[in-house]
Image: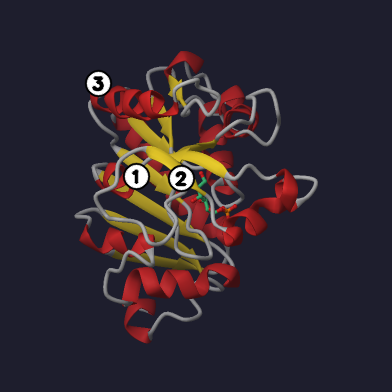
């Protein structure tokens, strides 16, 4: 595990942005796994800036981790709308090569299986970007999350619904289900980077890095990944022991 701690989320985003942008520079047909939420926004700003400065994203393919079930994509809270607004519309990427699970699909099980197949057909994910939930979830894999799970329909926990209520008018408007890549799907990526910012994530991050891997903290599965880098700000690192702070 590679743990990089920065003074601020902006500094962490610069480092994570350099990693992704240089990967794309050297691998113009990169396959990136992407996340939504507040955490990756400064990273996406670095990708957009690099593209505006000439980095070519036209050959890149992306797969998002998750999408709410039953939220039409023209609603701004849908993860498809979020990605279009915050990233895809600012890159010279081919929108047809950006994949987000279809939470409006008639047959959700078939949609999950098809998503796995699409990832396989693209040759697998080179770099998966992750945030972390305050309960340790990655994607929408809520605890307890088996480490070999595949893309599936997930019932969101009350904790996640209340964490995500800030994007909706009220907690009652947050969808109760989502499609998410499984923990096993995430672990198949050739590299993973997890961004964690703020004190609200400090406990979950400590569990992910310093406690024995446990399905009650899905992010702890990453301890078994051969190429995982944590980009963390000081607030999020506040519970880590010294050993991981140097
Ligand atoms: C979103 C996702 C989630 C978020 C996590 C943190 O696609 O997969 O696991 O990364 O809920 O969300 P924020 O960044 O909003 O704190």
Near mark 3 (Cα within 10 A), the count class, few <14, some 14-19 or many ≥20, is few
- Image label count: 3
State the residue at coordinates (48%, 28%).
100
Give the camera-side residue of 114 and 1. Answer: 114
Color encoding of the figure: secondary structure
**Residue at left 33%, top 57%?**
229
Please tell me in which quadrant of the rendered image residue 210 appears. Answer: bottom left
Residue 95, position in %: x, y?
50, 17
- First reached walking from the N terminus: tag 1 or tag 3: 3
Which residue is tagged 1?
A: 182
Q: Nearer the viewer, mark 1 or mark 2?
A: 2
Residue matched to label 3 = 121
Dot 1 crowding, Cα within 10 Å, few <14, some 14–19, many 20+: many
Q: Is residue 106 left or right of residue 213?
A: right
Counting from the top left corner in percent of width and height, residue 166 is at 73, 52
User: Are the two marked residues, 2 and 3, in contact with CB atoms closer than 8 angstroms?
Assistant: no
**Mark closer to the observer (1, 3):** 1
In the rendered image, which residue does mark 2 sit on? 154
């Amino acid at each position: 595990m590679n743990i990089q701690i920065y003074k601020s989320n902006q500094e962490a985003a610069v480092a994570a942005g350099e990693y992704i942008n240089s990967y794309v520079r050297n691998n113009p047909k990169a396959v990136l796994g992407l996340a939504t939420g507040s955490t990756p926004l400064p990273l996406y700003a670095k990708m957009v800036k690099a593209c505006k400065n000439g980095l070519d994203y036209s050959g890149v393919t992306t797969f998002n981790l998750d999408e709410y079930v039953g939220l039409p994509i023209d609603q701004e809270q849908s993860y498809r709308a979020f990605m279009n607004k915050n990233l895809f519309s600012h890159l010279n990427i081919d929108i047809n090569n950006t994949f987000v699970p279809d939470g409006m699909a008639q047959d959700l099980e078939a949609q999950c299986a098809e998503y796995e197949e699409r990832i396989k057909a693209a040759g697998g994910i080179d770099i998966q970007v992750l945030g972390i939930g305050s309960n340790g979830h990655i994607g929408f894999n809520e605890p307890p999350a088996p480490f070999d799970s595949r893309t599936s329909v997930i019932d969101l926990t009350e904790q996640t619904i209340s964490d995500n209520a800030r994007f909706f008018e009220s907690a009652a408007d947050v969808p109760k289900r989502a499609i998410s890549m499984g923990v096993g799907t995430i672990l198949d990526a050739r590299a993973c980077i997890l961004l964690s910012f703020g004190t609200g994530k400090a406990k979950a991050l400590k569990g992910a890095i310093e406690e024995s891997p446990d399905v009650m903290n899905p992010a702890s599965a990453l301890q078994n990944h051969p190429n995982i880098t944590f980009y963390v700000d000081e607030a999020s690192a506040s519970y880590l022991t010294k050993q991981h702070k140097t």
